[in-house]
Image (cartoon, rainbow, N blue to C red):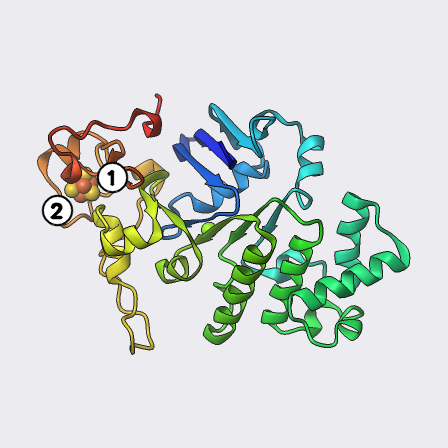
Amino acid sequence: QQNMLEVSNLTTTFTSRKSTFNAVDGISFHVEKGETLGIVGESGCGKSVTSLSIMGLVKPPGKVSGKHIRFDGDGIDLLHLDQKEMRKLRGNEIAMIFQEPMTSLNPVYRIGNQIGETLKIHKKIKGIEQKDKVVELLKLVGIPRPDEIFYSYPHQLSGGMRQRVMIAMAMACDPKLIIADEPTTALDVTIQAQILELIKELQEQKGMSMILITHDLGVVSEVCDRVLVMYAGKIVESGPVKQILQNPQHPYTKGLLASLPRKGESHKRLSYIPGQVPAPKNWPKGCRFSDRCPYVMDQCYVSLPPLFPISEDQHAACWLVKEEGREADVKHETVR
Ligand code: SF4
Ligand code: MG
């Protein structure tokens, strides 16, 4: 099996003085080698917590558990690495691109030195060799006059250029897997398109695996091969992007699609999904989408639907799609 990542029953638990809740609630998925997997949903659905959990970046008292998070074949289980082993992987074999480069770049270091530091830590590349490699990386991500930009500070660059720097830093060690969390959300629309194009190009050129986290199904349709739709800590639908766009089965996916602008419309349309994602402490007892779902039935208030197969590679967690002969896929079901 050629999976770059295999996540099984991932659960991320946070505890406050008053309550304990699972921000990510028993999800399973995989990323194939060379594939771009989108994770889509509104904010508060557990997308970012999923990525932080994979990267070992959930801070205590947050707790990550599950069956396994296998990375690159069955050799490494990220769930069982200690902090030191995880630091060795992060930025090296698994890299991240965040939404806001200003918070991830150190304001007092020159761009070139920050990228160089990654090369030094993980690859022991120093001196003139390091500088050459950094300039090469800046070129790779389309930064003009890389020899000059090398000496710039983050605040001297535009948002788009800073995001290119972040991408250069992520690419520095030729990672096997890149996790990009809302990489274009903070940028102007035209810049967004350019950055997405760059990410897509690099992914194809290097044959990396990628997880792209976004609230925007439009972004998914541009860049991803497959997509997971998350709602309230669960995967509610998954499948190949084309299939999901043409034949969405979960009412939440349908709502996300309906709120995309159509061709010729410059602005996002009003959300077709009234209401908000409930906070974990307010999750309804049955289907977590029940208080917003236009198709809600009695059964939905009582029990949480598991993922049902629609076809070999598409699944949806909705009682509507449960039909005679469609057995719940136990592989995807939460083990409680
Ligand atoms: Fe709507 Fe019921 Fe399906 Fe949930 S299970 S999405 S409430 S129809
Ligand atoms: Mg997020």
Say whether residue 330 is left or right of residue 37. left
The residue that label 1 is drawn on is 311
The residue that label 2 is drawn on is 295
The residue shown at (58%, 39%) is 55
- 92 up-or-down from 71: above or below: below
Q: SS class of the residue under badge 1?
A: loop
Q: Is residue 290 visible?
A: no
Question: Label 2: few (<14), some or many (≥20) within 10 Å?
Answer: few
Three-letter amino acid code at the position of disc 1: Ser
Q: SS class of the residue under badge 2?
A: loop
> Where on the picture, by quarter, is residue 319?
top left
Residue found at the far right of this picture:
127
Q: Position of residue 42 (x, y in %)?
A: 36, 53
Q: Nearer the viewer, residue 135 or 27?
A: 135
Q: Nearer the viewer, residue 105 or 145?
A: 145
Three-letter amino acid code at the position of disc 2: Tyr
Mark 1–mark 2 CB contact (< 8 Å): no
Q: Position of residue 180 (x, y in %)?
A: 53, 52
> Where on the picture, by quarter, is residue 317?
top left
Mark 1 vs mark 2: in front: 1
Q: Does the closest atom of ligand 1 sit within 8 Å of the Cβ of label 2?
A: yes
Give the quadrant of the C terminus. Answer: top left
The residue shown at (61%, 44%) is 176
- 270 up-or-down from 285: above or below: below
Question: Label 1: few (<14), some or many (≥20) within 10 Å?
Answer: few
